[in-house]
Image (cartoon, grey):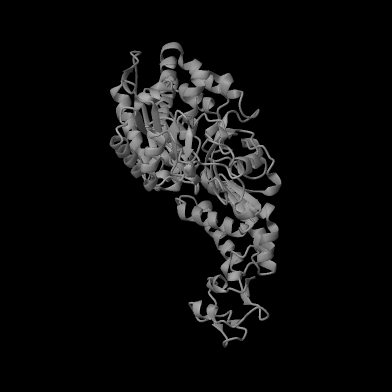
Amino acid sequence: MIRTHVMICGGTGCTSSDSPKIAEAMENEIVKLGLQDEVKVVRTGCFGLCEMGPVMIIYPDGTFYSRVKVSDVPEIASEHLLKGRIVDRLVHRDADKENIELPTLKDIEFYKPQLRVALRNCGVINPEDIEEYIAMDGYAALGKVLTEMTREQVIEEMIKSGLRGRGGAGFPTGLKWKFAAVNQTPHKYVVCNADEGDPGAFMDRSVLEGDPHAILEAMCIAGYAINANQGYIYVRAEYPIAVHRLQIAIKQAREYGLLGKDIFGTGFDFDIDVRLGAGAFVCGEETALLTSIEGNRGEPKTKPPFPANKGLFGQPTIINNVETLANIPQIILKGAEWFASMGTEGSKGTKVFALGGKINNTGLVEVPLGTTLRQIIYDIGGGIPNGREFKAVQTGGPSGGCIPAKFLDLPIDYENLKSIGAMMGSGGMIVLDDSTCMVDVARFYLDFTVDESCGKCVPCRIGTRRLLEMLDKITSGNGTLEDLDKMEELCKYIQANALCALGQTAPNPVLSTLKFFRDEYEAHVVEKRCPAGVCKKLLRYEIDPEKCRGCTACARKCPVNAISGTVKQPHVIDQTKCIKCGSCMETCRFGAISKK
């Protein structure tokens, strides 16, 4: 009889740190110790606390081991599993709570404020075993809608829940379904948008890796609601673990009669196929995604008509992203009122965020909408590393904006973010500290957008490139104050005239940084100085003659021989030769070299 479960994270982050080898080693040790009838190793999805991976949790006691190595496995197996003694050196403890004898998930600050709905099964079940999903009420929601609810009732329940799309501007999910349902055509489609392309975003990937059956079940429910019989999951090929687990889940669901013909004996037919994307950012836009599924170049189309009226293969189509779909089975089982009780008046439920950048607890979090940035960054994220100051957070990826420190206590929801020039987007949250140049941040996102533009419309193809050229000019020390006004004018033109939402929102990082960090732009333009010391062409490395001992270490380290001087005499940097690599400052043992 199995008495102990060893849960090992099998998400992408932990997999890259050898968690599959850890799981294999643990299985071998269990056999060596003769515990195979008592202990089971379960490869799960992401636990969320990626910074501390690879993660291992042992139940029933709930011991949370972090940063486990393959070499740690024999000790954990012999001490914990065989002798019942905790391996204390591997137990994860919050820095200020080292006195807790045996912290479990409920004691760790990262998890305390969280409320998991979309991530409810991630880190809890084996995503490659349909029976574990069924044991967690999996496919019960599908059974309920097929045997107890009309199509109209399902749509009404979604509308009452207040669920909004979790992948973009937040359009009401139930309303989108209603638009597709009223179209009386013989063919309709349900599409899952898993083309998660924002820099720093990994929410959808983690759900697919940790709970793929939830997405299949939700798509079946959506198919029943709008009377569709075919679904497609459009996922980027860069997510091999997610794709593999989706394929396993689809195969299992078909074998169990939960996909295909006559589901639950109700006469309802629905099947799902996977379509791989090549990693084009523009294919996250719904019409470009549909065009790609059809086998054509992924380019957006003008709207209207909207996909709910004329989408895939010219037929009514609903498109929801992974996180949106992950909420649906729970809404059906627990009711619209339950879901609507979370969040704010206009933004119901929870939201998953991928925390990255200058943050102590990099990882995946899910909190009720209305939670403040301060709670996410400090209570859950553990604050900024190395005692530095929080400067801003970039939300919504290239389509989003930079939120400064004065909004740390702003409740995060769709309306509040829009009011300050940002957007929810898919939920990437890149934290920036006081060492960050905000002009360079805007330039980074514009460079990404220019590279990823499909080129179909002039405002995006040419407009974003002109914006990037202006930012390059400013970060090189050649900008003027007139350039700032020209940039704002061009941003507004692109917003008003670009063909699709990706082009229309591309100027957001520029506009938000101009609005909240204009002083940094002016420093670059007027003083020819980068306050954060990031923009290389505006940097100067200088040697303080009072501190320089003439040890020659910096001159010997300089790769371009830009430093001259004799032994025991102050040295000098030739600014015309200096390539701003910083190796001289790193080498100096006397603090004589500074960056200005």
Residue 483 horizontal/vertical position (percent): 64, 63
Quarter of the figure with the C terminus: bottom right
| Displayed quadrant of residue 45 | top left
Q: Is residue 568 above or below residue 142?
A: below
**Residue furthest bottom as drawn:** 566
Residue 381 horizontal/vertical position (percent): 58, 43
Q: Residue at x 54, y 54 (%)?
A: 445
Residue 87 horizontal/vertical position (percent): 45, 41
**Residue furthest top as drawn:** 148
Q: In this rendering, does residue 400 appear at all?
A: yes
Judge left or right: residue 332 versus residue 42.
right
| Displayed quadrant of residue 417 | top right
Q: How many numbered circles does the render carry?
A: 0
Closer-to-camera residue (445/7): 7
Quarter of the figure with the N terminus: top left
Residue 172 horizontal/vertical position (percent): 55, 29
Judge left or right: residue 445 versus residue 402.
left
Closer-to-camera residue (255/478): 255
Q: Residue at x 68, y 52 (%)?
A: 515
Q: Is residue 13 above or below residue 148?
A: below
Q: Residue at x 54, y 25 (%)?
A: 175
Closer-to-camera residue (118/332): 118
Q: Is residue 179 above or below residue 588?
A: above
Q: In this rendering, does residue 321 appear at all?
A: no
